[in-house]
Image (spheres, grey):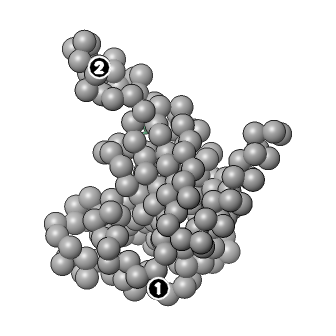
């Protein structure tokens, strides 16, 4: 099952993530895929806010992984595998300790790099630019095209009954928020 949503701004993406956080529970694993600068970290900070993580979330760089606590004392794990050199390094970052502990909500940026190693159902959230940047070549001014660049396509991809169910609940939440 898939849900596709167009976001017009970072604020939209953040609020969408806050709504989505309501369907999350202990043990959930989400991998984030898509283009560089697609909005993965923005989405994940919205999730963290929705779950009542008090800290301001920043991208894990040297550690590749940060641990936070939600307001209901669930561990919230933010991993970023952009700098993961190769898959054998995966052992070293400690992510596996969290994946199956059943007490963590785990978000993995660039998670497609290790998705074959995850032995549990996970959700994929794919974030990409809506307009193809390659077609904006007419303008030589990089800043101009960057300013226009706030549209994103966000696709929630489930490959399990577990996540299908959660996406169905999420659809209902979206309907309610759109009608209010
Ligand atoms: N609709 C949008 N949704 C999310 N972010 C957006 C949107 N429009 C513009 N942005 C901006 O895109 C930039 C990159 O966002 P972000 O860091 O969340 O992406 P990322 O996918 O985590 O990047 P990276 O691939 O470097 O990890 C930010 O400055 C963000 O504000
Ligand atoms: Mg990021």
Decide which of tag 1 and tag 2 comes sooner along the chain: 1
Reply above or below: 180 against 118.
above
Q: Nearer the viewer, residue 97 or 7?
A: 7
Q: Is residue 128 left or right of residue 138?
A: right
Q: Quadrant of residue 98?
A: bottom left
Residue 128, how many percent across, how many down? 40, 42
**Residue sitting at 36 percent across and 49 percent down?**
34
**Residue sitting at 33 percent across and 59 percent down?**
110
Q: CA distance from mark 1 to mark 2?
A: 44 Å
Secondary structure, mark 1, is: loop
Q: Ligand 1 is in which quadrant of the figure?
A: top left
**Residue sitting at 41 percent across and 22 percent down?**
148
The answer to whether residue 69 shows anywhere in this view is no
Q: Quadrant of residue 108?
A: bottom left
The answer to whether residue 111 shows anywhere in this view is yes
Residue 106, how many percent across, how many down? 48, 71
Location of mark 2 (residue): 136
Secondary structure, mark 2, is: helix
Location of mark 1 (residue): 100
Residue at far right of view: 180
């Amino acid at each position: 099952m898939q849900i596709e949503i167009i976001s017009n701004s970072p604020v939209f993406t953040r609020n969408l993530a806050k709504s989505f956080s309501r369907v999350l529970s202990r043990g959930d694993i989400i991998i984030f895929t898509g283009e560089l600068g697609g909005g993965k970290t923005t989405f994940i900070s919205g999730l963290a806010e929705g779950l009542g993580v008090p800290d301001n979330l920043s991208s894990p760089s040297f550690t590749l992984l940060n641990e936070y606590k939600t307001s209901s004392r669930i561990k919230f794990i933010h991993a970023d595998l952009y700098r993961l050199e190769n898959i054998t390094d995966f052992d070293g970052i400690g992510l596996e300790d969290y994946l199956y502990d059943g007490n963590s909500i785990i978000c993995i940026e660039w998670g497609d790099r290790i998705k074959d190693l995850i032995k549990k159902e996970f959700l994929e959230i794919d974030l990409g630019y809506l307009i193809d940047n390659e077609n904006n070549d007419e303008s030589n001014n990089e800043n101009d095209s960057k300013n226009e660049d706030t549209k994103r396509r966000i696709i929630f991809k489930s490959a399990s009954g577990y996540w299908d169910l959660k996406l169905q609940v999420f659809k209902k939440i979206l309907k309610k928020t759109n009608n209010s």
